[in-house]
Amino acid sequence: GVERARGPGKGRSGVPGGQLRGVGVAAALVHDARVLLLDEPTAGMDPRQRRVFRDLLAEVAGEVRVLLSTHDVADLAEEADHVTVLSRGRIVHSGSTASFLAHTPSDAPPGRAAEAAYSALLEGTGAVSG
């Protein structure tokens, strides 16, 4: 079908999704946006594209507020200064990234602190069965 003709990870224009997201951020900045609302911005990006995208967000963070929703908590561990976690429509955590990461269990694997903190928060709400 049409999806196959475009190839995996490519949008309607035939441009990879990661490049389209970068263009979207650039367009918002050209129009002097004060807030960027990003929903799953790194979905479909390869590791290099993710790094370039994260670097771009870090560059503009002083000029623009960035509100990011993601299922990939690795996205927030490096860049976020505030984390809000929702479970079943309720806020189960809202605070600094450090306060979020403080929920990391001591036995969490290296490099997986954000993921472990997220899981611990959800387990504390009964949203995840162990």
Image: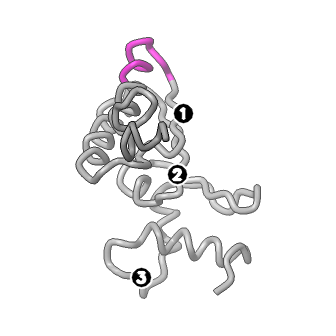
Going by the image, does 59 lie left or right of 82? left
Q: Which residue is mark 2?
A: 70
Mark 3 nearby-residue class (10 Å; few <14, some 14–19, many ≥20): few
Q: Which residue is mark 1?
A: 37
Q: Which residue is mark 3?
A: 108
Q: Is residue 29 above or below residue 88?
A: above
Q: Amino acid at mark 1?
A: Leu
Q: Is residue 80 above or below residue 85?
A: above
Q: Amino acid at mark 3?
A: Ala
For label 1, the SS is: strand
Residue appearing at x 29%, y 33% in the figure: 59
Q: Quadrant of residue 9?
A: top left
Instruction: Work out which quarter of the rendered image holds the C terminus and state it.
Output: bottom right
Q: Along the line of sight, which residue is nearer the eye, 66 or 39?
A: 39
Image location (x, y in percent) of residue 100? 52, 63
Image location (x, y in percent) of residue 21? 40, 33
For label 3, the SS is: loop
Q: Nearer the viewer, mark 1 or mark 3?
A: 1
**Which segment did they paint magenta?**
26-34
Q: How many angstroms separate mark 1 from mark 2 (CA)?
A: 11 Å
Q: How many angstroms separate mark 1 from mark 3 (CA)?
A: 31 Å
